[in-house]
Image (cartoon, rainbow, N blue to C red):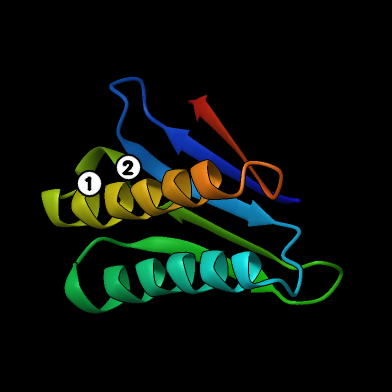
Amino acid sequence: MINAKIFRDLSGKIIGFTVENHGESVVCAAVSMLVLNTVNGIGLFTEDTFDFDCDENDGGYLTFSLTEPSSRTDSIGILLDTMFLGLMCAKEEYPDEIEIIEIRV
């Protein structure tokens, strides 16, 4: 099962996420593409700074966090919210394959 943790600030804005336990199913491939595309889009189309790490071994994981969450721009908000929408749609279609946990920090 894919485990996604979405980190939100106290106002509810996404400031980071972690996705773990990627497998080799179509759903795993879709989730991987979704989160990687989001990170790539943030890197190319925004000036926000972030930390990013990923590893394909042992089920794989990807982690992303804004370096300065308080200076989060609207552009990054749109990209992160769109990624979250994609994850929620995938969970709706494949509820046994994706777990999404939202954490306020």
Residue beneath disc 1 = 72
Extreme-top residue of the structure: 10
Residue plotted at (53% across, 70% down): 30
At mark 2, the secondary structure is: helix
Mark 1: which secondary structure?
Answer: loop
Q: Quadrant of residue 45?
A: bottom left
Instruction: Tell me where residue 2 appears, x and y as whole percent.
Output: 69, 53
Q: Residues within 10 Å of mark 2 (few under 14, many from 20)?
A: some
Q: Residue furthest front?
A: 93
Does residue 44 sit above or below 99 in this rendering? below
Vertical arrangement, residue 84 with respect to residue 75, above or below = above
The reply, left or right, for residue 37 in relation to residue 91 is left
Whether residue 34 is visible: yes
- In the image: residue 38, left or right of residue 4: left
Residue drawn at the location 36% of the way across and 76% of the way down = 40
Q: Are marks 2 and 1 in contact (CB under 8 Å)?
A: yes
Q: List x then y, in percent, for residue 88.
A: 45, 43
Say the numbered circle drawn on residue 69.
2
